[in-house]
Structures are given as structure tokens and as C-alpha cells.
Amino acid sequence: MDAVGGGPPSLGAVVVVGAGLAGVRSVEALRAKGYQGSITLVGAEWHKPYDRPPLSKAVLLGDTDDTTVDTDWDALRCELLLGHTVTGLRLAERSGGTLESSAGELPFDGLVIATGSTPVRLPGGGPQHVIRTIEDARALRAGLTEGARIVIVGAGWIGAEVATAAARLGCRVTVVEAADAPLAGAVGPEIGALTIPWYAEAGVELRCGIKVASIEPDGLALAGGGWIDAHEVVVGVGVRPETAWLAGSGLELEGGVVVDASLRTRRPEIVAAGDCTAWWSDRYGRRLRVEHWDTALNAPEVAAASLLGQDARYDTVPYFWSEQFGRMVQFAGYPGTARLVFRGDPAEPKWAACWLTGDRLDAILTVDRPRDLVQARRLMMSGTPVDPDLIIDPGVAFRNTVRT
């Protein structure tokens, strides 16, 4: 979908739906770009916007209990409607529309959709934890006591982080994964298999190739028979975009709110940002939905500009990081079907994996090599060709792998 030309002819009241990081950054960006009209921010939680990455790290460990985003709400002149849900959207014939919400009807001239995503839950009548809100993290933290049997379903990014925290707190931790290796869906089974020893080193039992039938009181019922006892069960098997409230609205929904490279929907007065958004990437020639913090932080700048009728496109290299089992794992790019090569020996503490198409660097994963990640992402952003023979040498600075 190509970018829609121009913006709304006269932008009056703006409503931002979703009080996470993408929501507050949208408000900040609108004010920074000179918008002087009214802004209302609607959020389902009673908390002011806060950062979510620490929930599965510092909050679980008890190192912090407050990740509120630092912003000056008085200066932003934004009405906060916290603890309210939006249930529907009615579009006006030409421009604008009305939101249906628990706070009543909310008319708007401009709309930012930043409703984020909702964790997938598994069948069964037993209690299961997910990590999405501060209450989620606090509730799980209460059960992470020494000797407690903690079972985590899903060896993805969140699963590994929760396992890290639980093991550090003295819990007996088992991670169950349906795939043959951790992170197989995110970075492929070859890279995921390299993380298997990390679990054993941390005293965590990892069971791959195991599917869960249901969550029951006191444990997991496994597909095909079998049982795992648990005091607490944590489910980390993915999320779905929070878009059900948009059904029948006339906006296109396909794996998220469909937007162009300028983050506009079919209606130029409605934009979307964050992990509820399926945006068109010029860089990768396909639609992407990226569920990570970096997108929530930076996409609102483009969404706000587009809402104000300015020319802007979101053409980033996706980025994500995870702290697991004493290691900093960072990832940038989109690997697609590119060729995988290693930079350094994965048996060593510090290494990287690179995905190449010819002399183009498509993606990189680093383990405790943050400088490689920063320099590699710059090369990907600029599209600079690299020398594959130099890429694999960890002694060569990444910035010096440019093909000459």
C-alpha cells in the first residue's frame, strides 16, 4: 500500500488509544511538531504509561517496582482517561469519527491507534501467568520463592528471561518448548540450538519437542499423555495484536492494523504505531509487525508527522535485545532466506551470527558483542555493502568490513 498523500484538511481533536510507550511517545511527538489542539490518551490500565521490558527482568527480581515513563504531563496538556477500554470505532463519512468506550463516546478529528498486543493463553482451567502488565509481573514475583516448582511454556525471548529470573531466585525451573530448540521461530533452529547449554548452566531443565495439552491445577497436561507438576505456570508462547475492537470499523486488519510506510491507514486522519501495527517496509519489500520496544519508541515520530500531513516514512532496521542467563543477546534486521555465517566461535563466550545476501548484511545476532551490533545496524540502515570474508573475522571491527 503506497503512502496516502497529504493529511487531514483541518486537524481538530486528537485521541490516542493505548497508554503504553507508543501512546505516550505519540503525544510527545505531536506536541514537539507543533500541534496545539486537544489530545486525549485512553488506556485500559490505571497506571500512567510505563516501560514493559523490565517486567520480565528487574521487576521479577525485585530490583524495581516502578518503570513509569518520565514525561511532563502538564506540559503535554493531555487529558488522561486511564482505566478505560475502547470497544468500537465509527467512522464519519468524510473524515474523523467516534470511539465507543467505557468512558462514553469520544469524537475525534485525528486518531492514533497504539493498543499494543495481548499474550496468548493456553487451554485449561488451571492458573497461568503471562507477562504483559506490571500486575502480571508482581503476581508472578510473589510465587518465585526458593524451591518453588516453576514451569515455563515457551523458550522464546520472554520464556528465557523469566527462567533467568526464577533460577536466580532459587526456584526449580522447567522450560517446555514445542519446537526442537529455543528461539527457533525467532532466529531459526541452528542459532536456537546454540542457547541450549545456557539453560543447563543456569540449573534450568529444558524440554524441547514437548507440546502442552492444557494448563491444570498443580501442573501441565502434555499432549499424548504425561504430566509436569508445578507450583506456578508461566505461558510465553506469543502475542496477538489488540485489534478486536476495530472489527467492522472499515479499517483493514491483517495480522495487525494495516498501514502504509507512513503509518497511515486507509483514512489519512487515522494512523497506528507500535506492535498492533502491520506496516509496509520499503527496505524489506513486505509488511512487518514488530513487537519490540524499539518500534514503540520510534514509530510514533513518523505516525505523528503523518497525522499532521507531513511527509515521513518508517523505514527502520528492527532491533531487539534480551538479557538471559548472564548474557546480553541483541538482534537487528530481518533475515528472511539469507545465508547464515558466524563471526567468532559460538563455543566462546562472545560471538555473533550474520545473515548475508551476497554482500548485503540483512541481519545480525550478537552475544555480548554490543559494539558489533551498533556498527552493523548502521551499515544495514545505510545499505552499505560488506565483505563476507571480513565479516567472519571477529578481530576486524564491523565498521571496517565495508566492501571497497
Image (spheres, rainbow, N blue to C red):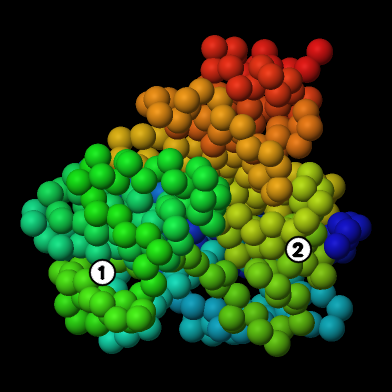
- The answer to whether 351 is drawn above or below residue 278 in the figure is above
Residue at 20%, 62% (x, y): give it: 150
Residue 151 is situated, as x and y percent measured from the top left of the image, at: 25, 64
Q: Residue pushed farthest right?
A: 5
Sequence-earlier tag: 1 or 2: 1
Do labels 1 and 2 touch, CB within 8 Å? no
Look at discs 1 and 2 and give the one toward the viewer: 1
Left or right: residue 307 versus residue 393 is: right
Q: Which of these two is toward me, 302 or 210? A: 210
For mark 1, give the secondary structure.
strand
Q: Which of these two is toward me, 289 or 163? A: 163
- The answer to whether 329 is drawn above or below residue 164 in the figure is above
Distance CA(mark 1)–CA(mark 2): 36 Å
Left or right: residue 342 versus residue 176 is: right
Residue 35 is situated, as x and y percent measured from the top left of the image, at: 70, 52
For mark 2, give the secondary structure.
strand
Kind of residue at disc 2:
Val
Q: Quadrant of the N terminus?
A: bottom right
Kind of residue at disc 1:
Val
Residue 216 is situated, as x and y percent measured from the top left of the image, at: 24, 82
- The answer to whether 250 is drawn above or below residue 275 in the figure is below
Residue 337 is situated, as x and y percent measured from the top left of the image, at: 71, 48
Which residue position is annotated with label 1?
Answer: 233
Indicate which disc residue 259 carries. Answer: 2
Neighbours of disc 2 within 10 Å: few (<14), some (14-19), many (20+)? many
